[in-house]
Amino acid sequence: MSTARRLEELVARVICPRYPLARDGLDFGDGGPRPLPGGFCVFRDTLPAALDDLADARGEGRFPYVCADFERGVGHRVPGAVRLPPPWAIGATGDVALARAAGRATSLEALDRGIAVVFAPVLDVADEPENPIVGTRAFAATAEEVARFGAAWVEGALAGGAIPVGKHYPGHGATRVDSHLALPTIERDADALARVEEVPFRAAIAAGLPAIMVGHLHVPALDPTPGVPSTLSPPTVAGRLRAGLGFADGLVFTDALDMGAIASRTGGPETEPAVRALLAGVDVPLLPDDPHRAARAIRDAVTSGRLPRARLEEAVRRIESRVAGPAVRTPIARTSREETAALAREIARRSVVRSAAAPPPALAGERVALSLLDDSADGEAAGGLRARLGHAGMEFADEDEAALPLVVVLADVRDHKGRVGLPDEARARLERAVARRPDAELLIVGPPGAVPPAARPLRTTHVFGTDRASLDAAAEVLTGRLAAEGHADWSR
């Protein structure tokens, strides 16, 4: 890299803010040129219009690149696009070929929309049932299964051409704290981390994973310094991840720096998270809450000698060498591919889980007292499911009639929610329905932890997402048109 390149241009390349922050360039406070950040992260509230704007800004080049969370396909963020069932549903099918197909479909559809960097797959192990932020975002509750499905997803994504980013190293599964709200602590020792949390990351790296996102997790076994998140920890990033896991020249992102676990650590130049992340060995300080302040702090740290210029140039080299590969499509696609919708249906139909001792449900033509307990953020799920059940032949009665109770729990895993289980009032309604009629049917739509095993009646059906394909599959199973073939650990 030429030493003549302006320092501000190097700094701008490593910054990746939330669109449209810094859309007009980064202000270094010196009245000079305002270079665009190296990339922008897009979210549902700015899409799809942001994609056209960023395509215009990019022109014929590769920068600024666009990145997004696509754990459930492009429809996870882009309105109107097909949303795949969540990773746990893919794991419940037992078929890694579907994980590979999901990775490829996600990658192709991302590039169709001008998005080169995909924040997926989730490589966390969902072995804590009360984890409020992982749940169905993971492929499974065991390290071996997450490793199998995660590596296959990476292979598919690489075949599609985009850049997959595995997350959240060193592993967010073993905590009951949401890092969007506060800093979780992972208490496992180094041997346990190697046996569980790191297994999927090692498998994904072996499968060619080019980039990893580090989570805001305090892990004393890797860095005992009190209160230091992994994202800002040299022993964790430069030491364990790069030197220990063989990811020496891989591209490393932080998790969002505007999250609650990290934002409170923002202060003067000595505590600026973007600078500390680069010092730790990270290449991309993602979503700083003030990208202009972060850019000035990085420039000043290089000028003062606190951050070696060589470290900044190394980060830029990694970014440019990775992002130069994907060829994003122009013009931006407006619809999903037909094969993506077919894949969503196949995953959904093969992932429905039915409690082992329960007889197959056949509620077509039955009068049922439908009770919807909606704890999700999907405003269309309840109405959509009711319509599907009615269309499939189910008749609805009042709750006080002598009709079979069908209790539907709609839940989700989302940031800032802070819990995975039902709120007290909804939990009480479920318990009353089950106590009144032992033959009550329960449909869980969402994470396994939404309804603990002890609160589930014998007749329980489980799908893992509120996406259209999963709701269709649930209606088919409950009305006897589809056999439940999915596998899941019902103790969780």
Image (spheres, rainbow, N blue to C red):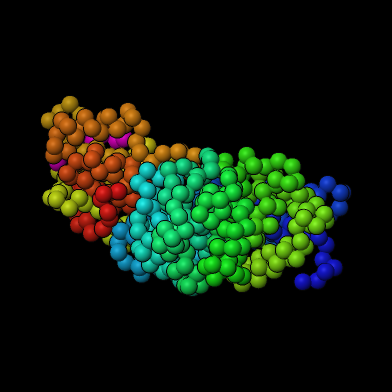
Residue 36, quarter of picture? bottom right
**Which region is colored magenta?**
366-373
Residue at 62% across, 39% down: 264
Residue at 75% across, 46% down: 269
Magenta stretch prevailing secondary structure: strand
Camera-side residue of 252 and 158: 252
* Residue 266 in the image, given as x and y percentages of width and height: 67, 42
Q: Residue furthest top?
A: 400
Any part of residue 106 in sight: no
| Number of marks | 0
Any part of residue 174 in sight: yes
Camera-side residue of 18 and 492: 492
* Residue 447 in the image, given as x and y percentages of width and height: 35, 47
Above-or-below relation of 369 to 202 = above
Q: Is residue 66 magenta?
A: no
* Residue 63 in the image, given as x and y percentages of width and height: 69, 63
Assign the N terminus to one quadrant of the image.
bottom right
Camera-side residue of 308 and 329: 308
Residue at 49% across, 46% down: 185
Above-or-below relation of 185 to 430 = below
Q: Residue furthest right?
A: 31
Above-or-below relation of 190 to 425 = below
* Residue 40 in the image, given as x and y percentages of width and height: 64, 54
Residue at 14% across, 50% down: 357
